[in-house]
Amino acid sequence: MKTVKLLAKRLLKNYMKGLICSSRLQQLMDLLDVPDSFDGAVEMAQDLICASGILSSSLVEKNAAALQGFIDTIMDVLDQFYERGQDYVCNAGIPELLESFDLPDTMIWAVEIAVDWFCN
């Protein structure tokens, strides 16, 4: 998952979301200059950025720092989920996850998005 996170960060840092989401997998791999063995990780990074409508706000697109912080926060929550495992995370409620990962209630949005990405 760390490779996917790094690839997503590189894509978001260097390219507009429209380009990332409209490009074919091989085009993204060429842009990132990664070997063919990274095709799965690049595809997951593209899905992470594009599959959810949460990143479509033009305000967010204009503010790269906010977008990067948004993605970083979700990815940090996902890293914690991977440590605990899918059985636990996908069967727990949001309040239980907030408590068990010692996250403040203000992080509910990150946990909800991370659960959606992790479990679906």
Image: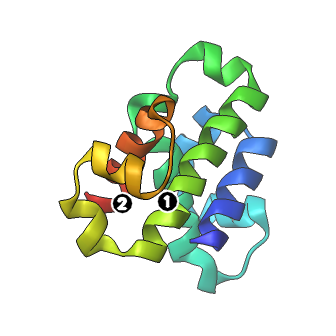
Q: In percent of the image, x 66 and y 47: which residue is there? A: 72
Marked residue nearer the N-terminal end (2 or 1): 1
In terms of depth relative to the viewer, which is nearer, 86 or 49? Answer: 86
Locate residue 54, reporting x and y percent: 44, 30
Q: Residues within 10 Å of mark 2 (few under 14, many from 20)?
A: some
Residue 82 occupies which quadrant of the picture? bottom left
| Colour approach in the figure | rainbow
* Residue at image mark 1: 78
In terms of depth relative to the viewer, which is nearer, 25 or 107? Answer: 107
Answer left or right for 44 relative to 94. right
**Relative height, residue 104 to residue 46 (above, below):** above
**Relative height, residue 83 to residue 37 (above, below):** above
Which residue is situated farthest in the bottom direction here?
37
* Residue at image mark 2: 118
Amino acid type at mark 1: Leu
Callout 2–callout 1 Cβ contact below 8 Å: yes
Q: In percent of the image, x 63 and y 13: which residue is there? A: 59
